[in-house]
Amino acid sequence: GRYLSSRKPSSTSLASSGSFSTGHPLSVLPFDCQRGKPVPYGTSVSVERRLVDGQDYVVANFALPSTFAKSISLALFAPDQPSDPPFTIIPLDPLINKTGNVWHISLFQLYVPNLGTGLFDLTKLHYA
């Protein structure tokens, strides 16, 4: 399902910034992880132009309020196989990805019009 979970992470990577791999063949991801925004709650997908390079990016922002969570991870699943194990799990760093009681992270992917279906289309990934 499409929701965030406070399950214990199974990876030691931090979601502070940049690309990373969990060792799974599909986990070298063609998007960047950034701090994210604490609002709106839930998941929001938009297209934004980044000032750094002037290009348009698809941005998927995840924000989950939790008063008691000690850690949060974002698990990404292939859209055509959502019942399979996640192809990557991104543990959030509370010093970077938490504002007040809201955990947050954004994934940035270069915007390509008419991308179609595919594993790395952020608008089609399943997450938990």
Image (spheres, rainbow, N blue to C red):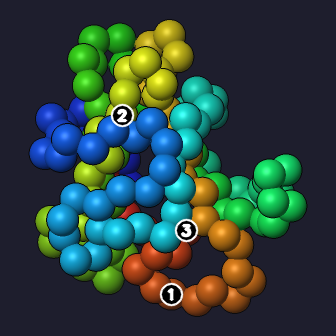
Kindly indicate whether the residue at mark 2 contacts the one at mark 3 (C-beta within 8 angstroms).
no
**Badge nearest the viewer, 3 or 2:** 2
Cα distance in 3D space between marks 1 and 3? 9 Å
Q: Residue at x 22, y 59 (%)?
A: 22
| Res 26 seen here | yes
37 displayed left or right of 75: right
**Badge nearest the viewer, 1 or 2:** 2
Q: Residue at x 48, y 50 (%)?
A: 18
Viewer-closest of 52 and 46: 52
**In the image, residue 63 lies at what x, y percent?**
50, 34
In the rendered image, the vertical position of residue 46 relative to residue 73, given as above or below: below
Mark with earlier residue (1, 3): 1
**Numbered mark located on residue 92 in the image:** 2
User: Few, some or many C-alpha atoms within 10 Å of disc 3 (few <14, some 14-19, many ≥20)?
Assistant: some
| Res 1 seen here | no
Residue bearing mark 1: 117
Could you tell me which quadrant the N terminus lies in? bottom left
**In the image, residue 57 lies at what x, y percent?**
71, 63
**Numbered mark located on residue 123 in the image:** 3
What is the three-letter code of the residue carrying label 1? Thr
Kindly indicate whether the residue at mark 2 contacts the one at mark 1 (C-beta within 8 angstroms).
no
Cα distance in 3D space between marks 1 and 2? 27 Å
User: Few, some or many C-alpha atoms within 10 Å of disc 1 (few <14, some 14-19, many ≥20)?
Assistant: few
What is the three-letter code of the residue carrying label 2? Leu
Determine the secondary structure under disc 1: loop
Viewer-closest of 20 and 46: 20
Mark with earlier residue (3, 2): 2
120 displayed left or right of 55: left
Viewer-closest of 75 and 27: 27
Kindly indicate whether the residue at mark 3 contacts the one at mark 1 (C-beta within 8 angstroms).
no
Determine the secondary structure under disc 3: loop
